[in-house]
Image (cartoon, rainbow, N blue to C red):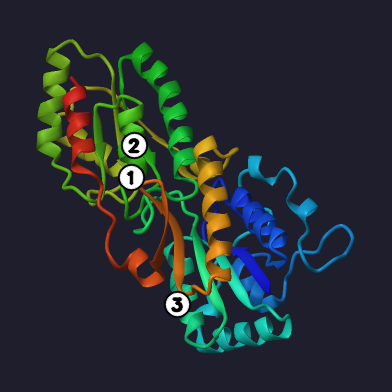
Amino acid sequence: MRIGVFCSGGDAPGMNACIRAVVRRAISDGHEVVGINRGYQGLLDEDFFVTEASEPTMSLRSVSGWARFGGSFLRSSRSPEFRTDAGQFKAVANLAKHRIDALIPIGGDGTFHGAVDLAKHWSGRIVGCPGTIDNDLMGTDFTIGFSTAVQTAVEAVDKIRDTAESHERMFLVEVMGRHSGFIAVHTALAASAECVCIPETKTDIPAIVRDLHELKARGKTSVMMIVAEGDEEGDAAKLNEELKAAGNPFSTRCVILGHLQRGGSPSPEDRILASSVGDFAVQSILEGHTGMMAGIVGGQPTLTPFEDTYAEHKPIPSELSSLIERLAR
């Protein structure tokens, strides 16, 4: 069997470890792996990974040492062309031309939407791996890249806290998460932040200001607020202005971490997760499965239909938000 592997959408630390696992597992079972550069667009452009020996298929040595690097050596992209019927028919033709029997896309909900669309026109097997820092896919406890993104954010907040305490200020630190507050909540808890604002819950400006006055009355001299970029009240800068207008007692500054959270060497947790789901994706394809995402739930490998991974909003455990509130005193 010839298996194609690619990364699509936003990059996430651990993608290279996942590709490595796919290649090593497939070859160990006697199959070939075709690396597709730049996601769905690369499939349309016939942009394939070529080894140093000019071989069109990946080898065991092709992925040596890949697990420790962030980003994606196969690159990643978004493809407006693939979203069209013409683009999808072109993809099917290229898959047939290069004798690719199965695909393992690594990405998030956009990547899996694309897999569902492709499956309408192609009879090959498709099993995906959850690669997104947002941790917003159902069917897996965590997604590849989430652990590293949180680690990066926590390290940044720890450094900002030093300045906040030195100047007795409040900092609003904006993290990624347009539709999901997982990074914000986990960062806030791990970095001992006093407040977190996320898309899943209403941001009550007057209530926050009351809490800030109480903190100041208790002798608190610095405060950290973690803001998910997709909070319904707006980004960190907008929230800062609203807090000022409502009587925030602290001097404030805003910091936007942005794409810093996407990069860096993947954490051990991300390397282990990526290796596990990459291996499991190959196994699932060889067993005849298709239209599924390979995830880990409760420590067990789990297959979830692509449509189910994004059909519902992945809920954030309410006890985490409650814990942040209790500890922020």
Where is residue 132 drawn, in percent x and y?
Answer: 47, 53
286 sits to left or right of 169: right
- Tag 1 residue: 182
Q: Position of residue 244 (x, y in %)?
A: 20, 33
For the point 27% across and 59% down, the residue is: 313
Viewer-nearest of labels 1 and 3? 3
Along the line of sight, the residue nearer the viewer: 7 or 34: 34
Q: Mark 2 near mark 1, Cβ–Cβ under 8 Å?
A: yes
Q: What residue do we see at 40% from left, 48% from top?
A: 142
Q: In the depicted view, which residue is nearer to us: 328 or 120?
A: 120
Q: Is residue 236 visible?
A: no
Question: Label 2, label 1: how many angstroms apart (C-alpha)?
Answer: 6 Å
Q: Return the residue at label 2.
A: 186
Labelled disc at residue 116: 3
Say whether disc 1 or disc 3 marks the residue closer to the N-terminus.
3
Q: Nearer the viewer, residue 320 or 200?
A: 320
- Report the residue at 85% width, 66% height from top: 55
Amino acid type shown at disc 1: Phe
Look at 65% across and 70% down and name the residue there: 3
Indicate the secondary structure of the residue bearing disc 1. helix
Occupied quadrant, residue 322: top left
Kind of residue at disc 2: His
Q: Can the viewer see residue 44 in this picture?
A: yes
